[in-house]
């Protein structure tokens, strides 16, 4: 009979998520994950199968607890929801000392790392980018019903790229990250 699990899986995943988000998959050592989660290596491997299994759980947690709640108001948005989304993201990136300002986006960071060579990770990043684009598109359609489909698609692609750029820049140049979001706000507001 195996040992009974005595730790909170969701809390362990959240703690590991912070390590992966800050350091990336490759630089997140098992000892750092042990320290963050309070688990021994054997418990990590028993619960998640591998460091990679823990990373996959952290990505799922990131999508469910961080990304989707932020995108939820864009699912059936009010006309100002896209502006609220962009302003909220801007404020989070601008807030000195905030985790997002210091670390950007877990999945955008992963897109530029060796872990993105893995097909499953690449598919997850691609699906995230598509989900982000759909949500932004919903917000733009609600805010700018005057645009035709082609104009909406162009504005959606541009704003999505600006959000991705902001996340990519957050770690190294907060001013430029915020400027990317200001540009997106200006484009959405433009008549």
Image (tube, rainbow, N blue to C red):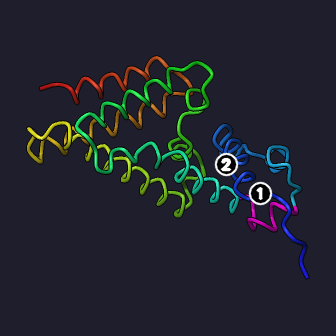
Residue 49 as seen in the image, left or right of residue 39: left
Question: As displayed, is residue 157 above or below residue 2?
Answer: above
Secondary structure found at label 1: loop
Q: Earlier in the sequence, mark 1 or mark 2?
A: 1
Badge 1: how crowded within 10 Å, few (<14), some, or many (20+)?
A: few
Residue 132 as seen in the image, left or right of residue 94: left
Q: Please count the marks in the image.
A: 2
Q: Which residues are magenta?
A: 42-51
Q: Which residue is mark 2?
A: 25
Q: Name the quadrant of the N terminus.
A: bottom right
Q: Quadrant of residue 50?
A: bottom right
Report the disc number at residue 8: 1
Residue 160 as seen in the image, left or right of residue 10: left
Dominant SS type (magenta)? helix
Q: In this view of the protein, which residue sits in the foreground, 6 or 170?
A: 6
Residue 26 as seen in the image, left or right of residue 120: right
Q: In this view of the protein, which residue sits in the foreground, 79 or 31?
A: 79
Q: Is residue 139 magenta?
A: no
- The structure residue drawn at horizontal position 73% and vertical position 51%, both measured from the top left corner, is 11
């Amino acid at each position: 009979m195996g040992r009974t699990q005595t730790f909170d899986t969701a809390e362990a995943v959240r703690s590991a998520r912070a390590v992966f988000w800050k350091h990336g998959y490759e630089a997140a050592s098992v000892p750092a994950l042990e320290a963050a989660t309070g688990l021994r290596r054997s418990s990590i491997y028993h619960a998640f199968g591998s460091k990679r299994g823990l990373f996959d759980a952290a990505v799922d947690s990131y999508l469910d607890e961080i990304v989707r709640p932020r995108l939820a108001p864009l699912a059936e948005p009010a006309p100002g929801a896209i502006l609220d989304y962009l302003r909220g993201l801007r404020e989070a990136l601008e807030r000195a000392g905030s985790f997002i300002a210091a670390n950007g986006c877990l999945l955008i960071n992963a897109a530029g790392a060796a872990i993105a060579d893995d097909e499953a990770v690449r598919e997850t990043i691609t699906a995230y980018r598509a989900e982000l684009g759909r949500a932004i598109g919903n917000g733009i359609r609600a805010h700018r019903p005057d645009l035709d489909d082609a104009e909406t698609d162009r504005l959606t692609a541009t704003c999505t790229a600006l959000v991705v750029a902001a996340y990519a820049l957050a770690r190294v140049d907060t001013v430029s990250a915020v400027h990317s979001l200001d540009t997106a706000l200006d484009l959405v507001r433009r008549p």
